[in-house]
Image (cartoon, rainbow, N blue to C red):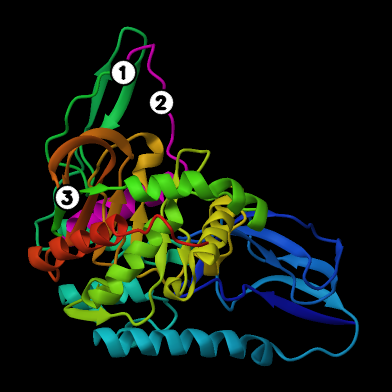
Amino acid sequence: MALIEVVLPRMGESIMEATVLTWLKKVGDRIEADDYLLEVATDKIDTEVPASDSGIIKEILVQEGEVALVGKPICILETDGVVASDDELIAPVVETLEQELATIEALTGIDLNLGSLTNADENRFYSPLVMSICKEEGIGAEELSKIKGTGMDGRVTKHDMMAYLEIRGKAPVATPPATVIATPEKTVEAPLATSVAPSIATPVTISGDDEIVQMDRMRKMIAERMVDSKRIAPHVTSFVETDMTNIALWRQSKKASFSKQYNENLTFTPILVEAVVKAIQEFPAINASVVGDKIIYKRNINIGLAVALPSGNLIVPVIHNADQYNLVGLTKKINDLSKRARENKLKPEDLEGGTYTISNIGTFGNIMGTPIIMQPQVAIIAFGAIQKKPAVIETPQGDMIGVRHKMFISHSYDHRVVDGSLGGQFVKRVSDHLEAFALDRAL
């Protein structure tokens, strides 16, 4: 018999930790290699973690609700035979993480290996995000060592850094008293302000008819990312109205035969994705990311699709190398990702590496919107509902009024790196590709 440590495997690009949601096995259970051990939540997805070996669970090292680190032990198995040493098991994971950190360092110029900061406290771990904030704000080793961490084992989190920066350089002030909110039914105590709230709190009135619901983990994550994006990127939005008549007529004539031939539902989405991909190929500068003061132009075209979940939350699976699919391939890929997203069956790699994002708000009956950019991308496009409208039609015999299928497209972009000319030309080119769709196009 031998005891081995099962480590948390690599969960995806740049993910270094995960919160344990539920253990699917308990101490004393016999498991086989690849059996699912536990469910975890990262900042991108909830997923199940398989066992790396067969054996009997002797000890669980990370309890539900606690944070596990990639490459670190989560449980101990008793197994037959001779097993590799701990260093041999963990080395591949550590090597992968080191390679990712080296890539980030090369792009940003930020020292993620801690350097002199580790000398202040060799036993304290700082995440790359915390290190990046230190670099930007000029926080040295001694100052960082004094920041109290609220994370696991006293780790300093992003929220700790934001709270510290809010009061940095100010004289210590007494903790403000709680304000009492009186209602006919009850009295609720609430703090006057927090480190991220306005200095003057707006009074909140709560009646007996109101329902107070705590945000779930995903909603909190969405809220944080949306606020961060609006804070980071100055958003500008351009609009065009597109004639979708040819596409609407073509889809109507083909969807039955398409379903019969490929066993897939033909929607407008793959056609929209195809038009976006063509426009990106003509305007590659829109397929970019921003890291610090550097612009990274992406070679791969990885299209993120915003998908609404049954819970009301939002998730963005990614079509990797979308330019390598034909219309049939895009349809199959989109249908598969959307289905697995709604069934909570996406894998971490399904959410990685997006370079440009599409939001199809027309599925909710909305005619237009101003979407928020997925950081660190520089643009996002939204397609509104397709509506029949009277329109002027130009013909060789002169102009006439006719009924056309019309759709608004809105394009939000980061004005730090995308000017109005590029942002406007790009969305117009997407529109041009849609309007040029051929009625006699073969499947």
Specify which label sits upstream in the sequence, 2 or 1.
Answer: 1
Image point (16%, 78%), residue name: 293
Image point (50%, 43%), residue name: 309
Q: Residue 212 at what x, y percent from top left?
A: 41, 26
Q: Residue 107 at what x, y percent from top left?
A: 28, 86
Query: Mark 2: which amino acid?
Result: Ile
Q: Residue 234 at what x, y percent from top left?
A: 13, 59
Q: Which residues are magenta?
A: 206-233
**Pointer 2 and pointer 1: residues touching (CB < 8 Å)?**
yes
SS assignment at label 3: strand
Mark 1 or mark 3, whichever is nearer to me: 3
What label does residue 165 carry, if any? none
Taking the view exactly as shown, the residue that stands out farthest to the top is 184
SS assignment at label 2: loop
Specify which label sits upstream in the sequence, 1 or 3.
Answer: 1
The residue indicated by pointer 3 is 239
The residue indicated by pointer 2 is 212
SS assignment at label 1: loop
Give the CA distance from mark 2 to mark 1. 9 Å
Specify which label sits upstream in the sequence, 3 or 2.
Answer: 2
The residue indicated by pointer 1 is 206
Query: Mark 3: which amino acid?
Result: Phe
